[in-house]
Image (tube, helix red, strand yellow):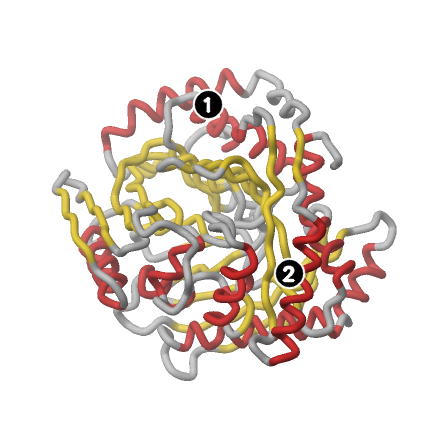
């Protein structure tokens, strides 16, 4: 494997040059230099299939040598098997798996979670990295787990030098954004309030898609989104029938040297120019938002206890208010030490889907979501995974993203609803999360 320093060349130019090549591609940029947030960036234009899993538990695995293994497993044995395959492949090797896991894979993590998807639908798809680039602390390095990648990466670098001399592509043309029916939202909100009053759950995250009609280049959209709203865990993924351009600021979990860190976000305010300091104080003291955030922290603490050393799970940061491009976010941090032998897939089994996108208790909230939303979320509320063999794994929460799949092109939004939520305020919070989309598409609904 080669890990060689490269000349100063922005990763975004390598992305533009890579995007001209045939499918697939994964770009994971980061607003680096912020402790606990983005620490490193990566671009992987050379990938090959590694693992695909359907909702039924049927899986396909292809080894680095090309040997194919097919089978079927359910429950804990499924996730243990994938951890074993990952451990066998990563032993003594350099490399990584990257890809995605859809929200509906929660049904594989816990059979009690309903999934609005066909049993044959692929809900987890990972690729093996053959070559790409990694950047940390301002240093860009070519990364070639497979030496055959050297030539193609050199060609992309030469093309990127030419891209560096050109202006950014024009923004996407005007398109139409379709909002959900107001009557549906009102009925769903009332239904949630009734369930909250009965004690069915303490919080539920209600989401809905903004459908985008028109031709949109998601490569250009990814550049526009990340230039307007730099995000620590956004980027672009084009893999296995799915394409996403994301400006997600939320980390699901990250692992480093056996320590796992989760950073759920609950509580959002759209920044009004000249009022950020006042809004920061207001959000910090908002009882509703703090209660919502603490509920999800407790949920994630419980999830992590299933795979961490007893007594190691703690909360070093609770309800901190952080600034992003056009919003303030209330964020907490939960940390723990993974038990020996726990790999990324058993960690997923214990924690998926992200609690910040379900509600509490998780399983009952997922049942409520299935009854109200009535269509698969797909990658939204799922995760893009980066699983390097050195153990520094990362999974984001897919929010604030343009997603194109078999359902069409959409930008889903939503928020958590608790007993003292107000319909108008919840609608306004969801709208604040769509502001970046409207700016990207140069259109207001």
Between the residue at mark 1 and the residue at mark 2, the CA separation in whole angstroms equals 45 Å
Residue where numbered disc 1 is placed: 17
Number of marks drawn = 2
The C terminus lies in quadrant: top right
**Mark 1 or mark 2, which has the lower sequence index?**
1
Q: Residue furthest right?
A: 274
The secondary element bearing badge 1 is classed as: helix
Residue beneath the point at 25% across and 44% down: 50
The vertical placement of 22 against 444, above or below, is above
Callout 1 touching callout 2 (CB < 8 Å): no
Residue beneath the point at 19% across and 43% down: 62
The N terminus lies in quadrant: top left
What number is the disc on residue 188?
Answer: 2
Q: Quadrant of residue 204?
A: bottom right
**Rendered location of residue 286, percent (x, y):** 76, 70
Residue beneath the point at 29% across and 45% down: 95
């Amino acid at each position: 494997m080669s890990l060689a320093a490269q000349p100063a060349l922005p990763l975004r130019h390598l992305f533009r040059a890579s995007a001209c090549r045939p499918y697939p591609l994964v770009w994971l940029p980061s607003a680096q230099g912020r402790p606990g947030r983005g620490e490193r960036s990566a671009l992987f234009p050379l990938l090959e299939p590694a693992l695909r899993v359907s909702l039924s538990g049927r899986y396909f695995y292809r080894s680095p040598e090309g040997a194919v293994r097919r089978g079927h497993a359910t429950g804990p044995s499924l996730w243990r098997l994938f951890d074993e395959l990952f451990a066998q492949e990563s032993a003594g090797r350099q490399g990584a798996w990257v890809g995605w896991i859809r929200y509906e894979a929660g049904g594989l993590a816990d059979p009690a979670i309903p999934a609005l998807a066909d049993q044959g639908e692929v809900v987890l798809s990972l690729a093996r990295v053959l070559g790409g680039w990694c950047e940390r602390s301002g240093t860009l390095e070519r990364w070639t787990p497979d030496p055959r990648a050297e030539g193609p990466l050199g060609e992309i670098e030469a093309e990127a030098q030419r891209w560096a001399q050109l202006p950014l592509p024009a923004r996407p043309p005007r398109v139409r954004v379709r909002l959900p029916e107001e009557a549906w939202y009102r009925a769903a909100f009332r239904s949630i309030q009734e369930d909250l009053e009965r004690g069915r759950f303490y919080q539920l995250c209600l989401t809905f898609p903004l459908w985008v009609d028109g031709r949109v280049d998601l490569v250009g959209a990814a550049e526009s989104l990340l230039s307007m709203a730099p995000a620590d865990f956004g980027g672009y993924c084009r893999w296995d029938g799915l394409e996403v351009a994301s400006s997600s600021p939320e980390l699901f979990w990250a692992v480093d040297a056996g320590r796992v860190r989760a950073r759920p976000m609950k509580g959002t305010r759209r920044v009004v120019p000249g009022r950020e300091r006042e809004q920061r104080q207001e959000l910090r003291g908002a009882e509703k938002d703090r209660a919502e955030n603490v509920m999800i922290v407790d949920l994630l603490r419980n999830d992590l206890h299933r795979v961490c050393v007893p007594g190691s799970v703690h909360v070093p940061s609770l309800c901190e208010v952080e600034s992003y491009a056009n919003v303030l976010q209330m964020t907490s941090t939960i940390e723990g030490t993974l038990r020996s032998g726990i790999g990324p897939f058993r960690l997923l089994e214990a924690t998926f889907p992200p609690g910040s996108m379900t509600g509490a208790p998780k399983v009952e909230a997922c049942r409520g979501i299935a009854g109200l939303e009535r269509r698969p979320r797909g990658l939204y509320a799922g995760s893009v995974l980066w699983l390097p063999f050195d153990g520094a794994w990362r999974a984001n929460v897919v929010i604030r993203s343009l997603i194109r799949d078999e359902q069409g092109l959409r930008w889903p939004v939503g928020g958590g609803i608790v007993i003292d939520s107000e319909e108008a305020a919840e609608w306004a919070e969801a709208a604040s999360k769509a502001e970046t989309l409207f700016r990207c598409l140069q259109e207001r609904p």
